[in-house]
Image (cartoon, rainbow, N blue to C red):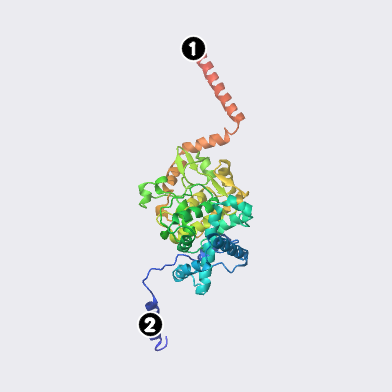
Amino acid sequence: MQPGDETKVCTSISKKLDGLTTEKSKNFIFKLHSHLRNVNDKAYEPHILAIGPYHRDKNSVKMMEEHKFRYLKSLLECKEHNISVYVSAIGEMEQEARKCYAEPISLTAPEFTEMLVLDGCFIIELVRKYNMVHELTKKNDPIFGRAWMRASIRRDLMLFENQIPFFILCKLFDLIEVPNNHSRLMYLALKFMRKIFPGKGCRSNIEKSSNEIKHLLELIHISWRPLLTMLDIDDNTKDGQRTWRFINSATELRNANVKLKRSERGSLFDIRFENGYLLLPPLYIGDRTESFFRNLIAYEQYFGDAFNYVTDYVKFLDCLINSPADVEILCRHGIMDNWLGDGKVVSNMFIKLGDFVSCNGQNFIYSKIFECVNAYFERRRNRWMANLKQHHLNSPWAIMSILAAIILLLLTATQTVFSGLK
């Protein structure tokens, strides 16, 4: 360095250090980091509906802007409100809402407030109308008249980057319905979103209060995640002390006489292993399933606690599925309902869902099940029984042949015994 450069560097660093704050960041609406996004960026992009500032300029979402204004108009007419009531209330919260976004927002205060009012009122009017959908069929509502549009809206409302703060929805709901009745807002939102869940388990009773919920995606995650008491988790897993290793694929497990069976109990996450049977609840696979899982996994990557239920469940299926043949086995046993048709597409989806995803190995919720399955898998007797069933007892004729051979052997033995007695 030249003379005096050292002083310049020290001054530059000192200014940057002085600019740092020890105040805890209030950001909770992020843009996804590139490593996770680049695996399948389309899974995080809205199809028709932009909520919040990150995707509002995309051409694909322009068609819904008119519907947002139509819903706002119907809301104002129904409640006989003036728009100034909403704008004034949300305007007071504009700065607080802006701080929730991790990325810089180029919108001015009036533009940002308008966006919050428009998007928030659209969501509230949408879920309110869905609760009285049978009355709307007569009014020719453009959204409720098209099933594909409702399905796309559900998908877009739960995208990681496509969110507004939940406290904005609560404030607007206070003005539209009874104040502080946020449990009803959560009920209506979950009632509308329930059809996007690929398996059982969505609960209406949420253990968190509305002021603890960040956005709709978190509400969906909270409503779907199971209670620890409902899962087969022991104290070693809860304390992060259990050691485990991955299980084999469905095809390999079948070759070791592990029997896969559909289970109707509990939620999608309630997987059990009992007496050689691996019991899994049914999973629906459709066009929006990958996006659903990816955005919930993204939520857990940023906000996950000790147990990441969705990430662990997907990791479980990633172990079971290594090929289209594994998908076929799961479908044959009623565990997977594949509406994508192609088993290769489904297998590739689950193989890639775990790319660049950090898994909390110390608190993996299926570690006990993995341990039990692996112990069963390694018993030589189980492999011998599986081999016997697959290669020698795989048809009625084969079973009859073996029975005939056994009977012949017994008759021969009996004849030999009687011959010896004479």
Q: Is residue 250 above or below residue 169?
A: above
Q: Is residue 204 above or below residue 82?
A: above
Classify mark 1: helix, strand or loop: helix
Give the amino acid at mark 1: Leu
Q: Are marks 2 and 1 in contact (CB under 8 Å)?
A: no
Residue that badge 2 annotates: 10
Single out the residue that lies furthest toward the bottom: 3
State the residue in front, 162 or 376. Answer: 162
Q: Is residue 282 above or below residue 24?
A: above
Residue 421 is tagged as 1
Quadrant the N terminus occupies: bottom left
Residue 138 image point, x, y percent: 63, 52
User: Is label 2 or label 1 in front?
Assistant: 2
Give the amino acid at mark 2: Cys
Residue 167 image point, x, y percent: 45, 63
Residue 157 appears in view: no
Marks 2 and 1, how far apart in space?
108 Å
Classify mark 2: helix, strand or loop: helix
Residue 398 in the figure: left or right of residue 383 = right
For the point 44% across and 54% down, which residue is it?
A: 183
Residue 264 image point, x, y percent: 50, 41
For the point 60% across and 30% down, which residue is it?
A: 396
State the residue in front, 2 or 140. Answer: 140
Bin the neighbour count of mark 1 within 10 Å (Cα to Cα): few under 14, some 14-19, many 20 and up: few
Single out the residue that lies furthest toward the front: 80
Bin the neighbour count of mark 2 within 10 Å (Cα to Cα): few under 14, some 14-19, many 20 and up: few
Residue 213 is tagged as none
For the point 41% across and 60% down, which residue is it?
A: 211
State the residue in front, 405 or 283. Answer: 283
Residue 185 image point, x, y percent: 48, 56
Q: Which is more N-terminal, label 1 or label 2? A: 2
State the residue in front, 390 or 164. Answer: 164
